[in-house]
Image (cartoon, rainbow, N blue to C red):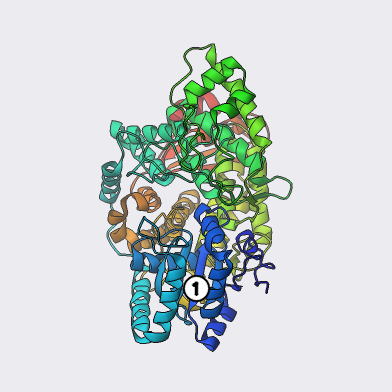
C-alpha cells in the first residue's frame, strides 16, 4: 500500500513515499484518523539535508517489521521542518522538555489531540551501547502505555502542553539601555573559545549574528578583545574543515571544537549570514582572506544554490549521496588526490590541508577532511596550491553529487538576496545585485498577498502567515532601497510592516506573534509564540526590531521610532539573559541607544560622481548606517551622525575623507 507522500511538494516527504510506513502529511486528516481509530500519533520531523534522518529512514522506516508495528498501533505523520518551521518550533520545545535534547530527526509521540507525551531524536533500530533504546522496543512500550495507562499519558501530555504555552512567549518587559548592550558583549566574551575561536565547545556552530554585533561594538569602543573575538572566530572557520576549500561556502556545523570535521550539509540560511559577516569584517579590517571567503561563497551560490533565470535561491545541499555515506563526496583519500595532481601539487596540498594515509572520518579512516593546517612554504608554492585546488574541484564535480533541495523559501531567499546586495557593493560584482533584485521582485509578485501577508514558499499559496517570512522580506526590501535608491522598495517594506502590525502585533503586551492571528491550526499551532532567540536563524522579533529601526532612520517618521521603542521594551527583560542567542535583538537595541549614521547622496542617475559616492557609501562599514540615494542635478553627499551633519561634498574622494 503506497503512503500519501508521493504527491507532496516537499522533497523530504517525497523521499519517504516508497517506505512501507503508511505516512500521512501534517493536517486535520491525520488527527481525525487518530481520533477515529483511538491511536497515538508518531510524528517524525526531519529534512532532506539531515544525515541522521536518512540513517533512521534506512534503519527503521524502510524496515518491513518496524512498519508493521507502526501501521498497526500508530497514525504516522511526517513533517519537513523547512516547509513547516512553525510546527517544528513547537514540537522541538516539547521534546526538549521531556528528554533534554532536540534536533533532527525529531521523534514525538502525540495524543490524537496533538499533545506530546513521549519523544526523542534519533532512535537506533536496537538498543545500543550509547544507552539509546532501540526503536522497535520503544514503539511496543509506547503503544502498550497508551492502551493500558491512559491517565498517566494524559497527565504527561497536559503538563508538557502547559510548558509549551508558557515557553513560546519569550517576551519579558524591561528598560532599554546601553547597559544591555555592554552586558550582552561581556556574556559573549565569557563563552568565547580563546584557543580555537567561536563560542562554547563541541559541537560548534557559526554564530554570525554575534560576530556582527561584536564588530559593531568594536567599531564604537575600539576594545581589542572585541576585535579579537570576531577576527579569531572568522579566521578559524575560514581555515577549518567547516569551510569547503574546494567548492566554496560553509557546512552547517563542526562536530569538534577545532572546526575540522563538519556535518557536511550546506544551508542557505547559514551561508547568507556568514557571507554578510565576512563582508562586514572585510569592510572593517581589510583582511584579504575574508574577501576570498566571501568571493568563493558567492561563486558557490551562483553555481549550485541559485536559479538565475527565474530568480530564486535554493534551500540546501545534502551531506550525503546515499544511505551509509558520511560526507564521501566532500572528503579525500591520499590516493584520490595523488591520482589528480602532479608530485609538486600533491606535496603542497598534503601539507597545507593535512592529507594523510589516515584521515578524520570514522566510517572510512582513509578519508580526509580538507582543513588549512599551514600556509604554503614559500611564494613559489601558492600557484601550485591554486592549480591543485582547481584540479580537485574538476575531479569532485565528476562524482555523484549530493541532492540540492530546490524549494525556494521566502525567508531564506530574502536573507540571501540581502547578503548578495551587500556582496554586489563590497566585491563590486553587479551580477550579485541583478540576481538579488530579481529574487526580491519575484517574492513581491508571487508570495505577497496584501490581505494575508507573505507566503512561505515562492509560487505556492500555502503555508502562509509566518512572521519570519514577512520581516525577512521587509529587511531585504530596505537593502534594495539603499542599493538602488528606488522608492518602490521602501514602499514595499512599509506595506509588509504595516501588515505585521495588523496581524502579528500583540497590542496587550507588545512584541510580534510568530503566526498570524487568523492562522490558528491544529494542536500546538493554536498557541501563538513570540520568539526572540536566534536559533539558529536570526529571531523574527529581532529582525522586526532592526527593520523598525531602519525605517525610522530612513524616513525620520516618529511612528516608526515609537513602534521600535515598544518592540524593544517588550523584550528588554529577555535581552540581558539571552547572550549569544540574543545577538539580533541586541543589534536592534544598539540602533535605539546609539547615534545612527545617515549618508545621503544626491545627483544624476547613471555613471558619474554621484554613482561613485553611492557605491562608496555602500562599501564603507559603519554600524547603524543607512544610505539614501536621491536624483538631483548636482552631485552632493552629506553625512549625519546622530543630529550632527556635515556640509555637502561633491565627489568620492571628499566623501571618503568625511567617512574616515
How many numbered discs, if any?
1
Circle 1 sits on which residue?
42
Pick whichever, 162 or 279, lies toward us.
Answer: 162
Residue 418, image x, y percentages: 56, 46
User: What residue is shown at x 56% (from left), y 74% (from top)?
Assistant: 68
> How dense is the environment of label 1, judged by Cα within 10 Å: few (below 14), some, or many (20 and up)?
many
Q: Quadrant of the N terminus?
A: bottom right
Front position in the image: 45 or 332: 332
Location of residue 12 in the rendering, given as x and y in whole percent from the top left corner: 60, 60
User: In the image, what residue occupies the spot 53% across and 63% down?
Assistant: 60
The residue lying furthest to the bottom in this view is 36
**26 up-or-down from 347: above or below:** below
Q: Position of residue 43 (x, y in %)?
A: 50, 70
Q: Nearer the viewer, residue 622 or 260?
A: 260
Residue drawn 49% across and 41% down? 274
Point out the image quarter for the C terminus: top left
Q: Secondary structure at mark 1?
A: strand
Q: Quadrant of residue 387?
A: top right
On the rendered structure, is 308 left or right of 373? right
| Location of residue 345 in the rendering, given as x and y in whole percent from the top left corner | 58, 18
Using residue 498 as the reference point, say whether residue 447 is left or right of it. right
Amino acid at each position: 500500500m503506497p503512503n500519501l507522500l508521493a504527491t507532496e511538494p516537499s522533497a523530504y516527504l517525497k523521499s519517504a513515499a516508497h517506505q512501507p510506513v503508511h505516512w500521512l502529511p501534517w493536517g486535520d486528516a491525520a488527527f481525525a484518523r487518530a481520533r477515529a481509530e483511538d491511536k497515538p500519533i508518531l510524528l517524525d520531523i526531519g529534512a532532506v539535508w539531515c544525515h541522521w534522518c536518512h540513517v533512521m529512514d534506512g534503519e527503521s522506516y524502510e524496515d518491513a517489521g518496524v512498519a508493521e508495528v507502526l501501521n498497526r498501533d500508530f497514525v504516522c505523520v511526517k513533517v519537513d521542518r523547512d516547509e513547516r518551521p512553525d510546527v517544528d518550533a513547537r514540537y522541538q520545545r516539547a521534546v526538549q522538555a521531556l528528554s533534554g535534547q532536540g534536533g533532527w530527526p525529531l521523534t514525538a509521540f502525540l495524543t490524537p489531540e496533538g499533545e506530546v507525551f513521549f519523544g526523542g531524536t534519533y532512535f537506533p533500530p536496537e538498543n545500543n551501547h550509547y544507552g539509546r533504546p532501540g526503536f522497535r522496543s520503544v514503539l511496543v512500550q509506547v503503544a502498550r502505555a497508551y492502551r493500558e495507562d491512559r491517565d498517566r499519558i494524559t497527565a504527561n501530555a497536559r503538563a508538557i502542553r502547559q510548558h509549551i504555552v508558557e515557553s513560546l512567549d519569550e517576551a519579558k518587559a524591561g528598560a532599554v539601555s546601553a547597559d544591555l548592550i555592554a552586558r550582552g558583549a561581556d556574556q559573549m566574551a565569557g563563552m568565547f573559545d580563546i584557543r580555537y575561536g567561536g563560542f562554547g565547545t563541541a559541537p560548534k556552530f557559526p554564530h554570525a549574528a554575534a560576530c556582527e554585533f561584536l564588530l559593531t561594538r568594536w567599531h564604537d569602543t575600539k576594545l581589542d578583545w572585541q576585535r579579537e573575538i570576531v577576527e579569531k572566530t572568522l579566521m578559524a572557520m575560514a581555515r577549518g574543515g567547516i569551510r569547503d576549500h574546494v567548492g566554496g561556502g560553509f557546512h552547517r556545523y563542526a562536530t569538534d571544537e577545532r572546526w575540522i570535521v563538519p556535518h557536511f550539509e550546506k544551508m542557505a540560511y547559514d551561508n547568507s549570514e556568514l557571507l554578510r559577516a565576512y563582508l562586514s569584517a572585510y569592510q572593517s579590517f581589510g583582511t584579504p582572506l575574508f574577501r576570498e571567503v566571501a568571493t568563493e561563497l558567492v561563486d558557490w551560490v551562483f553555481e549550485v544554490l541559485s536559479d538565475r533565470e527565474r530568480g530564486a535561491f535554493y534551500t540546501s545541499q545534502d551531506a550525503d549521496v546515499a544511505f551509509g555515506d558520511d560526507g564521501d563526496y566532500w572528503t579525500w583519500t591520499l590516493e584520490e588526490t595523488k591520482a589528480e595532481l602532479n608530485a609538486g601539487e600533491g606535496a603542497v596540498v598534503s601539507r597545507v590541508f593535512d592529507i594523510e594515509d589516515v584521515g578524520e572520518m570514522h566510517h572510512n579512516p582513509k578519508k580526509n577532511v580538507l582543513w588549512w593546517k599551514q600556509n604554503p612554504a614559500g611564494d613559489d608554492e601558492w600557484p601550485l596550491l591554486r592549480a591543485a585546488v582547481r584540479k580537485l574541484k574538476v575531479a569532485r564535480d565528476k562524482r555523484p553529487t549530493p541532492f540540492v533541495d530546490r524549494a525556494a523559501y521566502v525567508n531564506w531567499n530574502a536573507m540571501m538576496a540581502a547578503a548578495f546586495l551587500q556582496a554586489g557593493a563590497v566585491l563590486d560584482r553587479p551580477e550579485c545585485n541583478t540576481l538579488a533584485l530579481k529574487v526580491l521582485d519575484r517574492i513581491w509578485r508571487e508570495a505577497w498577498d496584501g490581505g494575508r501577508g507573505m507566503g512561505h514558499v515562492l509560487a505556492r499559496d500555502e503555508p502562509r502567515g509566518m512572521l519570519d517570512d514577512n520581516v525577512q522580506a521587509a529587511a531585504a526590501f530596505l537593502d534594495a532601497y539603499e542599493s538602488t535608491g528606488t522608492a518602490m522598495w521602501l514602499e514595499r517594506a512599509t506595506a509588509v510592516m504595516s501588515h505585521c502590525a495588523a496581524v502579528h502585533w500583540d497590542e496587550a503586551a507588545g512584541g510580534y506573534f510568530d503566526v498570524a492571528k487568523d492562522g490558528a491550526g491544529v494542536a500546538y499551532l493554536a498557541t501563538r509564540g513570540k520568539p526572540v532567540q536566534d536559533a539558529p536563524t536570526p529571531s523574527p522579533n529581532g529582525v522586526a526590531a532592526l527593520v523598525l529601526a531602519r525605517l525610522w532612520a530612513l524616513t525620520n517618521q516618529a511612528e516608526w521610532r515609537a513602534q521600535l521603542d515598544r518592540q524593544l521594551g517588550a523584550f528588554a527583560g529577555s535581552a540581558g539573559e539571552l547572550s549569544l542567542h540574543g545577538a539580533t535583538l541586541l543589534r536592534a537595541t544598539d540602533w535605539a541607544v546609539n547615534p545612527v549614521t545617515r549618508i545621503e547622496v544626491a545627483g544624476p542617475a547613471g555613471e558619474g560622481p554621484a554613482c561613485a559616492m553611492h557605491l562608496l557609501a555602500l562599501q564603507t562599514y559603519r554600524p547603524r548606517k543607512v544610505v539614501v540615494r536621491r536624483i538631483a542635478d548636482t552631485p552632493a553627499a552629506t553625512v549625519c551622525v546622530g543630529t550632527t551633519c556635515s556640509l555637502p561634498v561633491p565627489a568620492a574622494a571628499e566623501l571618503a575623507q568625511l567617512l574616515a
